[in-house]
Amino acid sequence: TMGLRQPLLLCLVVDAVMGFAGPMPRMLARPNLNPLTLRLPSMPSHLTAHRRPRQTFSMQYSSSSRSTTSSSGSTTIPDLNSLRGLSDNRTPEEIAKEARELIEVGLQLLAQTPPEVGIRRTLVGVQAILRTTRDLVQKFQGRGRAPTAEELLEEAPETLRTLFGRLGATYIKLGQFVASSPTLFPPEYVQEFQKCLDDAEPVPFAGIKKVIEEDLGQGSLTSVFSFVDETPLATASIAQVHAARLITGEDVVIKVQKPGVEELLTADLAFVYFATKVLEFLNPDFRRISLGDITGDIRTTMLDELDFYKEAKNMGEFRSFLASSNINGVMCPQTYPEASGKRVLTMERLYGKPLVDLDAIRAYTASPEQTLITALNTWMASVVGCSTFHADVHAGNLLVLQDGRIAFIDFGIVGQISPRTWQAVEGLSQGLVVSDYNMMAQALVRLGATSDNVDTVSFAADLKRVVERIERLDVDVVVASSGDEVSARLQADDEEVTQILLDLVAVGQSYGIKFPRDFGLLVKQALYFDRYTKLLAPDVDPLRDERIRSGMKRMADQTDMSGDVIDV
């Protein structure tokens, strides 16, 4: 007996195949196929005692029958060619082989998923889908007619974003991945998912306390911490942060994974990955855009974020990079391994203000301009001189401390740049310095051209328009007051930064150029720094300022570009 979980998964496979195959007009039934029968074992008797009599369920691919129900009550699926689209050149034998592989993948994923989590997530998913569908129907009810296909397509990005928000932590993170990946996803979805906020409710401290004690292997918090503030400093979908003090006296912050998050993400991501595999099975065209590979990478990346050992490792590598490069005035929080684990990360507590808090920077340092240049030089040097670079340098992750130092925090999202991408970035930078848009076009063509026949002259002209838009960017400064204090901050505008990146991607795609994701991550961080420059050092041109150019050139000259990844 396979037990309960395997039959449930196989039923899901059948349901998914039938659900997706049913409405697709291109899937035509064809005869003369060899039989392939898969019989599902029955559920355990204690789970079926109050149900109707047990039936055997089978999928039969028969050369002599196209019926959907056999005389014995078994279900007979149409022949394998019914799963072939007009552009599908697979043979029936290849389809049968892929079907078996699909089931094996599903079984492997299900084995990693606790059954109670899968059932709970199914119920949450059904509820979220019903609510979102109801909202969409109500939106169109007042028009007195059914919506057109075009209207439904226009509503799709907002509807999907709303659904993701209702589905919880995993899908919020997926939405943020979409928002940060304009080289992979359509622009209307990238723009809409900028609104996918990670503003989850905090978990009661009792649950957090239990995670800390379990992860550190201690019977009580007091064996490690003399104090832990039960009110979180910050909370997100995956973790929340609490102020604390070690028994040795150091002030720290504890990043704690929320209870049950790992099981939740494992179950959700397994479903998303399996669903893409089903889509690729039903329509091989999806393989040409590497849908399964992209989803697999997303799954790996997000599950990696659950391992705080890896974030601590990223921070340690960045600190080593700072020390080996003799970079002064920049720091990264110290971690405490004896008070950390896979789900708990304890770091020294920092006291400072975001890089865009202009008044605070002026209070902490005599030269905001030099502070910015130091931050920018450090980040660019880390791109070529460290094994990973910080891939989320929005204002909240760059602090100016009370002693004037700059702190890079939150290394949950990091990137790695290939030599090919770095060479394109160098060519792009050199072209920008001398306003040679042909040089820029040629660098980008070498990076991602899918054809040898790119009109670089026209491409250069379109690149010029994108660059001119960047140069015209205005900085919005928000003045806020609290009591006797008045502060000025840069208006966060991720949408504008993303829109510029989307423009660049769209221009490239119009000439058959596909940019890798590491290029998109890199450019987006550079656009963040461009906005910081306009606030803190409006007279500085990063591409022409010798203090920045010499620093980047020195680090590039010291970097070995022969490997697949740039290492320290």
Image: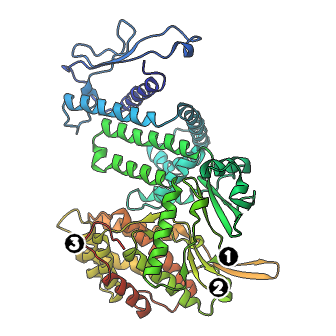
Query: Camera-side residue: 313 or 230?
Result: 313
Q: Residues within 10 Å of mark 1 (few under 14, many from 20)?
A: few
Amino acid on which the number 3 mark rests in the picture: Asp
Q: Which residue is mark 2?
A: 403
**Amino acid found under the numbered disc labelled 1:** Tyr
Q: Which mark is residue 455?
A: 3
**Mark 1 sits on what residue?**
351
Disc 3 element: loop
Please identify, in this view, whether the residue under mark 3 or under mark 1 is nearer the observer: 1
Is residue 472 visible in this depiction of the protein? no
Label 1, label 2: how far apart the Cα atoms are: 9 Å
530 above or below 193? below
Q: Quadrant of residue 110?
A: top left
> Residue at point 61% right, 74% down?
491
Q: Is residue 167 left or right of residue 104?
A: right
246 vs 564, nearest the viewer: 246
Percent across and percent down for residue 405 are 59, 83
